[in-house]
Amino acid sequence: MSTHDRCDKCNKLLIHPMGNGLSPYLLVGETPGYHETIQGLPFAFQQKHSRTSIAGDILKAELLRVGIVLSTVLVTNLWRHQKSYVTETIGKKSRQVEACPLSYHLDHLARMFIDKTHVLLMGSAVTQALLDVKYTQVSGLNVKVSGFSKVRFWVSPNPALAFSQPVGELRLAFQRFSEDISKKKK
Ligand SMILES: [Zn+2]
């Protein structure tokens, strides 16, 4: 079990990156869910008593198919903790807003890009947040993120989608990301 601590703004448990902090490669998932929060990891894994694969198992297996060992790269989520909502009232209207806004999470994530050469954005929410384009327009492609001209960004589906959708698109994106990394090494 890894150590937790809490968000100083909303008190939710923080999920820290996993893997190799010195790796030049960063993989970014979306929001940590129930299993991720229990395990304290950006992607959760099948436990001994369970026979069900979960998102982390898919991620690990699909990366291995393209020659990337999960523990050698750095993996994080865009959202540092599970989403929490507060009620915001303006005049007579009330609405639910995230206790910690997207900008808070984005600022933290962007700081992690500084020493990376390659970043894989996994899923629609993280793509929308960083590129402001629909993920379907850029999935499997090399994209530019403003402010980080030296970093090569790629977009893939969220690995968890492999449970409900054909896995080909995920494999293609992972393959291209892996090929791009290998090119750089030569
Ligand atoms: Zn928070």
Image: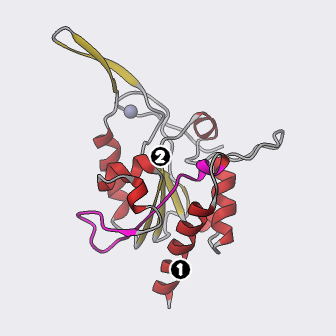
What numbered label is drawn on residue 179? Answer: 1
Judge whether 142 appears above or below 139 on screen.
Answer: below
Q: Quadrant of residue 147?
A: bottom left
Region in magenta: 142-162
Q: Are marks 2 and 1 in contact (CB under 8 Å)?
A: no
| Residue at point 67%, 47% (across, down) | 163
Q: Residue at x 39, y 23 (%)?
A: 85
The percent coordinates of residue 110 (x first, y second) are 32, 56
Q: Is residue 30 left or right of residue 172?
A: left
* Nearer to us in this view, 85 or 107: 85
Secondary element at tag 1: helix
Front-most of residues 172 and 52: 172
Residue 108 in view of the camera: no
Q: Residue furthest left?
A: 91
Residue at x-position 22% and y-position 12%: 93
Query: Quick check: 174 above or below 44?
Result: below
State yes or no: residue 166 in magenta: no
Residue 161 highlighted magenta (yes or no): yes
- Secondary structure beneath label 2: loop
Q: Where is 93 relative to 167, above or below? A: above
Q: Position of residue 178 (x, y in %)?
A: 55, 75
The quadrant the N terminus occupies is: top right
Question: Within 10 angstroms of label 1, few (less than 14), some, or many (20 or more) residues?
Answer: few
Residue 78 or 166: which is nearer the viewer? 166
**Can residue 160 be seen in the rendering of this structure?**
yes
Q: Determine which residue is flagged by label 2.
A: 30
Q: Nearer the viewer, residue 17 or 50?
A: 50
The extreme top residue here reads: 92
Q: CA distance from mark 2 to mark 1?
A: 23 Å
Three-letter amino acid code at the position of disc 2: Glu
